[in-house]
Image (tube, rainbow, N blue to C red):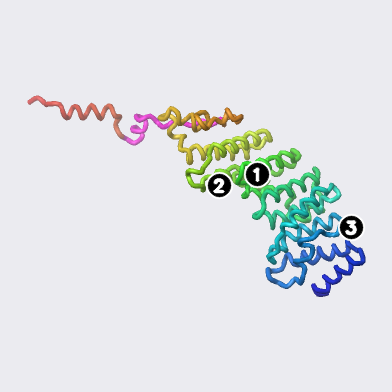
Amino acid sequence: MSIYQAQQAINHFCAAEEFNRAGSLFLYLLDEARTLEAGKDVGLLDAMWSDSPLPEAMDLNVRLLARGLQLGVLPKYNRDITYVLADLDQLLASATEAHSHAVTGVAVMASVYLMSRDPDRTLQYIRRALQLRGSEQDEGAEAFLAEGRRLDDMLWFIVPHLVTAARLDRWLTILEGLSPERRRRLLTEEDALLGCVVVADRLRIEEAVKPEGMRQWGAVLAAVENLRQRARAMGSGTLEGAAIRTLLAIHGEHLRQLDNRGSDSHGGDRAFGTGSGGDLSRRGHARPAICVRGPPRRGQAASRNGARPAGRRAHSRADDDAPRGE
């Protein structure tokens, strides 16, 4: 059967009100088109239901999967997906646990094909899938993921896009919503160390590339400190340690206040959030317990370098300048 014949069959099934048979064939064609190179002939497949609703009599699982697959097909053929996304939002809102497999499929398709374009919506789809999936991993949902990965692992996929405090907050809320066992597994698996470092550092990196006059380090410090506190509450030493590392990097590398704490009576306070304009504690964020060793004393540094103490050098110069008896 050619693609044109298949599309004619879909029309015949719809005319006969065999909507689920039409939907099943539509899913097959979409999945085939998803793997084709861009520009390959797909007939009118990219136009079918791209800007119109799928039949309401079609099973909701089928409609969800169709919209999810369209995320990977329509952009390849320069088709706008605004309508598809709006419809998908409504379908997901009406989904129940009976549709968890299909919702998982949507979340996976979004993480692959929608992430870079709309990370906030992708995070919303992942959250919805996790809510409907419940506490147990089942084989049907597992089949959507490669190499034995679970749905929870998709939280790591979106980490490079956590470039706003609001998005980081939503990510943490999803993480906190997992059962303790699933959260422990996610935060201790092979990818966890690197993932935690990127989570904690992403806001700092995003802020650092802005023009100097536009950088708002106070807001970044508040967001990372919030991350640190929530990581501690979840019992994740890895994520908390990554947050502390980022706090130190901001204070020392960008604010350059760690080394000047002893010489600047206000610099140390600003570095640790107690100076004007940087009081994290007044904003409801406890300061991290960070101990910074001050610079070595001048005499200690000179001794380590093999030089004489400053007092002895002054005394020697005075001896040289004094008049000598004959």
Residue farthest toward the front in the current orientation of the protein: 52
Q: Main secondary structure of the magenta part?
A: loop
Q: Quadrant of residue 321?
A: top left
Mark 1 vs mark 3: give the one in front.
Answer: 3
Q: Quadrant of residue 16?
A: bottom right
Bounds of the magenta segment = 289-306
Q: Amino acid at mark 2?
A: Glu
Rendered position, 72 above or below 209: below
Disc ID at residue 206? 2
Q: CA distance from mark 2 to mark 1?
A: 13 Å
Q: Secondary structure at mark 2?
A: helix
Q: Nearer the viewer, residue 108 or 235?
A: 108
How crowded pointer 2 is (Cα within 10 Å; few <14, some 14-19, many 20+) is rated as: some
Q: Secondary structure at mark 3?
A: loop
Query: How far across and how far down the image is residue 169, in percent?
Result: 66, 40
> Which corner quadrant holds the N terminus?
bottom right
Residue on which disc 3 sits = 57
Q: CA distance from mark 1 to mark 3?
A: 36 Å
> Which corner quadrant holds the C terminus?
top left
Disc ID at residue 81? none
- Which is more N-terminal, label 2 or label 3? 3
Residue on which disc 1 sits = 167
The reply, left or right, for residue 300 in relation to residue 3 is left
Q: Nearer the viewer, residue 303 or 136?
A: 136
Residue farthest toward the right in the current orientation of the protein: 16
